[in-house]
Amino acid sequence: MESAPLLIVARQPDPPGDFDTLIEALTRAGLQPYQARQRLIGSGLACLAQAPEERLQHLSTLVRQGGFHHWLITPPQDSPSPITLRSLEVANDTIRLIGREGELRLDRESRVVAVLADLSGAVQQRHVTKMMAQNAYRGAAAANGLAGDDLYRFILAQRPILDLHILAPDGSRSGMVRVFAGRFDPLGLGERKSLSSGGNLDALLGLLRERVAELRLHTDFGLAPIPGCRLRGSDDGLDVDKANLADLTRFGGIVSALAVATQLTAERGAPAAGAPPEREEVSSPLAANLPPPPDLAAIGHTPDVRRIAVCIAALAVGALFARRGSPVGSWLQQAIAQGWLQGITAVLCAAGAFHFWRLKRQIEELPTSRIRSMAMGLVEIQGRAERCYALASPLRHLPCIHFRLRKYRRDHRNRWSLYAETASGPVPFILRDATGAVRVDPRRATLLGVTSHEESGASRLFGDLEGERWVEEVILDGARLHIVGHARPLRDEHVSLRQRVGEALRQLKLDATRLRRYDTNGDGRIDGSEWDAARADIEQQQARAALATAPDGGYRAEVGAPPQRSLPFVIAAATSEAEVTGRLFWYSVALTTGALLALAWGGTIWIHP
Amino acid sequence: MWIVLIFVAVAALAGVYAIVCYNSFVAMRNNVDKAWSNIDVLLKQRFDELPKLVKVCEGYMQHERQTLEAVIEARSRISSARGEAAQRTAQNQLSETLKSLFMVVEQYPELKADRAFANLAARISGLEEQIADRREFFNDTVTLYNTRREQFPDVVIASLFAFTARELWRIDPAHRRDVEIDFKRG
């Protein structure tokens, strides 16, 4: 299969309008739709399929009709042995590239395909991180990651390797030079040489551009999904560097084959293959127009069952392991011996159990309202969360309406210890169901069902977290939420027709000029019938004025914390009320069990001191 | 001593449960009343909008006096209806006459194009949708209340303190009949 032809496409960040039609056609032709999307959307090159030529011809037709530039090539099976560059000499129109294994000459008629790559994995990390941030802040259409000049500069700042593939007149590769940054003598660069290894590679490329007939530069090794050309990590085992260099050579062979293959041009206008992406256009109006989050208020109180349990457990454990002679330890041991601590624990657990049971009943006894018709006061609604502000989680750059990031590191006793915590705070968001939308102010809300992610150790994706553990809780943008809270109007209710007419009549009485128009008999006074006519006219005018404008489409209400603390305010990431009440039920059961056990323990001591 | 303690604990728990249960019933009964009143709020708004609607239509629909008068008459019946059942019947009849009016409006393109009419029609349609939603909400609230008062052990508290069942908002049985669709013009 490795020798089977490849269909290489030039990806586009913003695919043509009937892209879905192309995906459907490719799916019918046997490709996975998700994989096809991945291979067509983005920047740089990608291998859409590797198969016998007849099948690829059919796919080629579909892709051409779909508006994508592409090539059909056979991957080269052999490759010239690379010369590792040690120095170079520039004389008249010739550049001598001198290596340990031999030397190569380039002149004005040479054609060179260059591949600039970083094998440390930093480019991939940065690419993914940037894509996530672009998606979170500017929408999916802007999520292109590292590309163009940014990618080039970033590679040069890492540990870059430059492969130069020299093409013979017949299109085959006549030679190959491998340049390791910092491992060749830059004297031959003359005035272009620099003190940085990346700068010297940049200078070398500049020199080649000036002195050879054609130089094609590729920077997407490790980012372009092409079979046999992947960047391995240190945990892949064996000799990773050797394997990566072999794949880099293979990648160079493929892109060299592209240089001589006939480009199969798209039927419709598509950006030139290999052209740098245009200035990123954001297609998601919501992401583009979102303001930054407001000044973060103090973290709202969110009763956490685990925190309560941990506090109680810490008290008990502290008492058990308190050293003899310490005042606190002896007080705790005395309290346990007399049963007081158990009694206090039982009371606290019972109070907690009662709180969650009562909350469960309140939620069960309140039917779910539709947003367009919800009444003011205590209300239960469900729908999908939407951001009002450009909020994204700090660890994974996920668009969200709430996040909390806790950072732990090992202390001197090798236990995880919390050393930093950040949270989004009570940032307002929108809840939308099938009938309408409402603003939600999450201050003082109890949050349930929050998604939690954890990263630790040497994470390839998020950088080195050696010795640390980061736990991020998020409620994602688009998550299904169930909210029980207090609805209040955001703006004054509309003024009634009677009030408008009354006000207009008052104004009329003060305006003698307008009033004179209704003096039909010209006696200088407005009698009863004339006043009735004026009133009818004003009513018509006000009715017309009220109906001339369509109803205001803004949010009419906001859901937030109730004025009485005894009423619930719950924001749960759940698909149904049953899920929320089920969770509260088990909290209540756990605390009730704790209360009964503590009571039994304490009761035993009291009865048999 | 153990038995006494257990008995006291069980009695205390039962007492707490009874108190919570009683308070729940009170809250649910008030929720039912509130849900009914919240429908009233929208019905009142619809009641107030209707004169505007009729005024706008009058100018265009010179030959549809019968339809307009039916709306006016249905509206006036609401004012004279006494009791929940009579109110519901009157409101249902008004909804029916409004549907007839909007069907007739289809024959008057100038009226349909009138901006004031379009805004008013949208407003009344919106109110009708909200009224339908609140009817469902009222029925949900009543169902929760009725179900809770019939379940054990809550039925004991409900019987002791005379929490009576509430009636759902039901539709006219005539509206359950299949609708005949006839495309032939009369």
Image: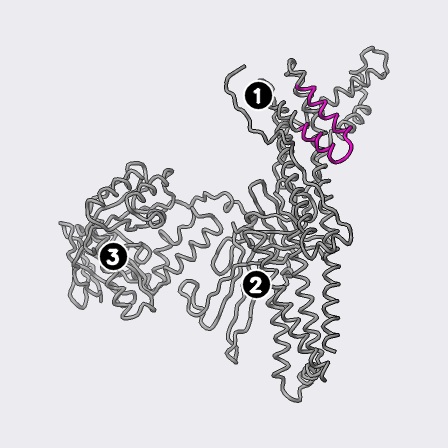
Q: Residue at x 74, y 19 (%)?
A: A537
CA distance separating discs 3 and 1: 68 Å
Q: Residue at x 36, y 55 (%)?
A: A151
Chain containing the residue with disc 2: A
Q: Amino acid at mark 2?
A: Thr
Q: Which residues are magenta?
A: B67-94
Q: Amino acid at mark 1?
A: Glu
Can you give x and y, in whole percent of width and height, for residue B88 in the image? Answer: 71, 33
CA distance separating discs 3 and 2: 43 Å
Q: Are marks 2 and 1 on the same chain?
A: no
| Residue tagged 1 | B106
| Residue tagged 2 | A422
**Depth check: A98 or A320 in front?**
A320
**Depth check: B82 or A62 in front?**
B82
Q: Is residue A235 left or right of residue B121?
A: left
Chain containing the residue with disc 1: B
Circle 2 SS class? strand
Q: Is residue A476 left or right of residue A546?
A: left
